[in-house]
């Protein structure tokens, strides 16, 4: 009898673990996360799409104005907690690596007044572009098929996509990419 209880418990634990793993795969398939990741990764080593969007002051800005720099293009919103979390790191990194040719570019999918207040609060020191449907269309062209926020794309000096991050970008990961590109 003693041997049966541990075996039964092991069987329950294994069944639960396999069920969780299978359930996770099913959820990814149903929500498109697997396809979304594939779309993002398909952009790697490809030419970054050109775009034009208005900045926080309403002036049209083109992605071509930062040609020759390592560009960190970050799609975000003020209401997005991970977006808010990574912003101070972006400000710090723009200060630290800007002279070496790194250029952060924020693309806010949000209200301009809220973004302006956010920029003042966080001391954002990099260009901020604004857009609703137009910004979402740009994000999709950059592989963000399902509108994940934050969504960050790192483009090398030659204009090729070198890194795509769905979700919050961590400093260690970012600096590993920058070291190779700067």
Image (cartoon, rainbow, N blue to C red):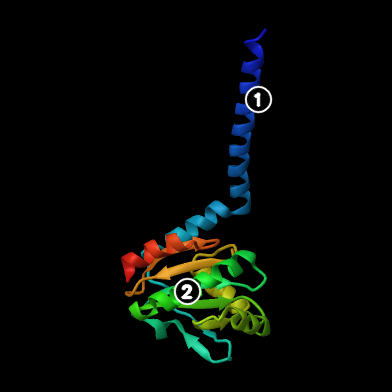
Q: Is 52 located above or below residue 168 in the figure? A: below
Name the residue rendered at 46%, 68% in the picture: 153
Other residues around mark 1 within 10 Å, as few (<14) / some (14–19) / many (≥20): few
In the foreground, 91 or 69: 91
**Image position, residue 63 (x, y; %):** 44, 81
Please identify the quarter of the rendering in which residue 108 is found: bottom right
What is the secondary structure assignment of the residue under circle 1?
helix
Name the residue rendered at 63%, 53% in the picture: 31
Name the residue rendered at 64%, 67% in the picture: 80
Quadrant where the N terminus is found in the figure: top right
Which disc number belongs to residue 92? 2
Please identify the quarter of the rendering in which residue 94 is found: bottom left
Outermost residue, top side: 1
Q: CA distance from mark 1 to mark 2?
A: 49 Å
Q: Nearer the viewer, mark 1 or mark 2?
A: 2
In the rendered picture of this protein, how many numbered marks are placed on residues? 2
Other residues around mark 2 within 10 Å, as few (<14) / some (14–19) / many (≥20): some
Q: Is 94 located above or below residue 180 in the figure? A: below
Q: Is 122 located above or below residue 169 in the figure? A: below
**Image position, residue 11 (x, y; %):** 62, 22
What is the secondary structure assignment of the residue under circle 2?
helix
In the foreground, 111 or 136: 111
In the foreground, 92 or 27: 92
Question: Which of marks 2 and 1 precedes in the sequence?
Answer: 1
Q: Does residue 145 appear in the picture of this structure?
A: yes
**Image position, residue 35 (x, y; %):** 53, 54
Which disc number belongs to residue 12? 1
Name the residue rendered at 65%, 10% in the picture: 2
In the foreground, 100 or 96: 96
**Image position, residue 90 (x, y; %):** 49, 72
């Amino acid at each position: 009898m003693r041997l049966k209880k541990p075996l039964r418990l092991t069987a329950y634990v294994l069944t639960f673990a396999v069920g969780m793993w299978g359930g996770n795969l099913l959820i990814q398939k149903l929500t498109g996360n697997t396809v979304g990741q594939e779309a993002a990764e398909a952009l790697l080593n490809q030419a970054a799409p050109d775009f034009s969007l208005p900045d926080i002051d309403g002036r049209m800005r083109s992605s071509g104005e930062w040609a020759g720099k390592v560009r960190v293009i970050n799609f975000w919103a003020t209401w997005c907690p991970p977006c808010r979390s990574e912003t101070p790191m972006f400000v710090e990194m723009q200060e630290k690596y800007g002279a070496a040719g790194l250029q952060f570019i924020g693309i806010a999918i949000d209200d301009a007044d809220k973004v302006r207040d956010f920029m003042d609060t966080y001391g954002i020191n990099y260009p901020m572009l604004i857009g609703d449907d137009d910004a979402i269309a740009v994000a999709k062209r950059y592989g963000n098929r399902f509108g994940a926020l934050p969504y960050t794309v790192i483009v090398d000096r030659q204009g090729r996509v070198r890194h795509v991050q769905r979700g919050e970008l961590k400093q260690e990961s970012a600096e590993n990419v920058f070291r190779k590109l700067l």
